[in-house]
């Protein structure tokens, strides 16, 4: 993987603004978003590029949108923190040597925010009602958790208590 990385990017020429950057932002709704961005580059013009590394191979084109969701999530957090829309999102697949890029616009980030709010509301409702229905797909046959899934006659484990463990003081971008 290291050899592939050197082929894709010459690390001796990279000067990232941040590496393994913990980011956290709270939306107007109160929903708190957190993540760790592998690399943030800032051009002399102030344009931001967010880079994430994957050890596997790139997804087929029809699955690229799903792969980019994480990157759009990071872009949303950076936009909410710094009021800056990253110029480029870049996924580097070290397993296959592919690089997937995307240049987000404001409408993308607003769409991701709406999707996250809808997902959070669905989770909140499921928590209140205890109704956690499985949504089977063709990938279920590969799942290691079939013994816990009602779709396969399994019994879900008890719902865990909230976790309040503190996060280590890494590089941070966001509220103190």
Image: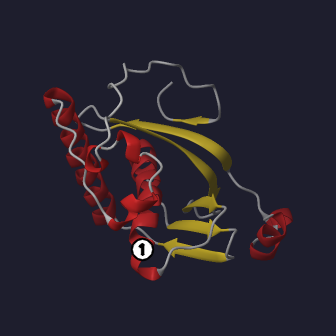
Residue 117 percent across, percent down from the top left: 23, 45
In depth, the one of 149 and 87 nearer the eye is 149
Q: Nearer the viewer, residue 68 or 95?
A: 95
Q: Residues within 10 Å of mark 1 (few under 14, many from 20)?
A: few
Determine which quarter of the picture holds residue 121: top left
Q: Residue furthest bottom?
A: 61
Question: From what the image shows, is residue 83 above or below residue 22?
Answer: below
Give percent across and percent down for residue 153: 28, 44
Residue 35, above or below 39:
above
Corner quadrant of residue 34:
top left
- Residue 36: x %, y % from top left: 56, 43
Q: How is the image coloured?
A: secondary structure
- The residue at 82%/70% (across/down) is 6
Whether residue 4 is visible here, answered yes or no, is: yes
- Residue 126 horizontal/vertical position (percent): 19, 35
Residue at point 74% right, 74% down?
A: 8
Q: Residue at x 47, y 29 (%)?
A: 175
Compared with 96, 43 (above or below) is above
Residue 85 in view in this figure: no
Q: Dot 1 corresponds to which residue?
A: 63
Q: Quadrant of the N terminus?
A: bottom right
Instruction: Identify the residue at the far front of this view.
Output: 153
Q: Is residue 84 left or right of residue 150?
A: right
Residue found at x 31% / y 49% = 152
Q: Dot 1 lies on which element? A: helix
Q: Could you tell me how many numbered marks the image carries?
A: 1
Q: In the rendered view, would you say 104 is above or below 109?
A: below
């Amino acid at each position: 993987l290291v050899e592939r990385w050197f082929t894709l990017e010459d690390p001796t020429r990279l000067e990232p603004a941040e590496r393994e950057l913990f980011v956290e932002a709270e939306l107007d709704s109160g929903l708190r978003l957190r993540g760790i961005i592998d690399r943030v580059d800032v051009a002399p013009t102030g344009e931001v590029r967010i880079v994430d590394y994957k050890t596997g191979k790139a997804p087929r084109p029809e699955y690229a949108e799903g792969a980019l969701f994480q990157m759009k999530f990071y872009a949303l957090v950076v936009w909410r923190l710094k009021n800056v829309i990253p110029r480029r999102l870049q996924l580097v697949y070290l397993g296959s040597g592919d690089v997937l890029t995307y240049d987000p616009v404001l409408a993308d980030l607003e769409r991701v925010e709406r999707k996250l709010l809808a997902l959070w509301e669905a989770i909140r409702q499921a928590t209140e009602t205890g109704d956690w229905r499985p949504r089977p797909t063709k990938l279920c046959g590969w799942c290691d958790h079939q013994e816990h899934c009602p779709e396969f006659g399994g019994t879900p484990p008890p719902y865990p208590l909230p976790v309040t463990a503190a996060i280590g003081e890494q590089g941070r971008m966001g509220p103190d």
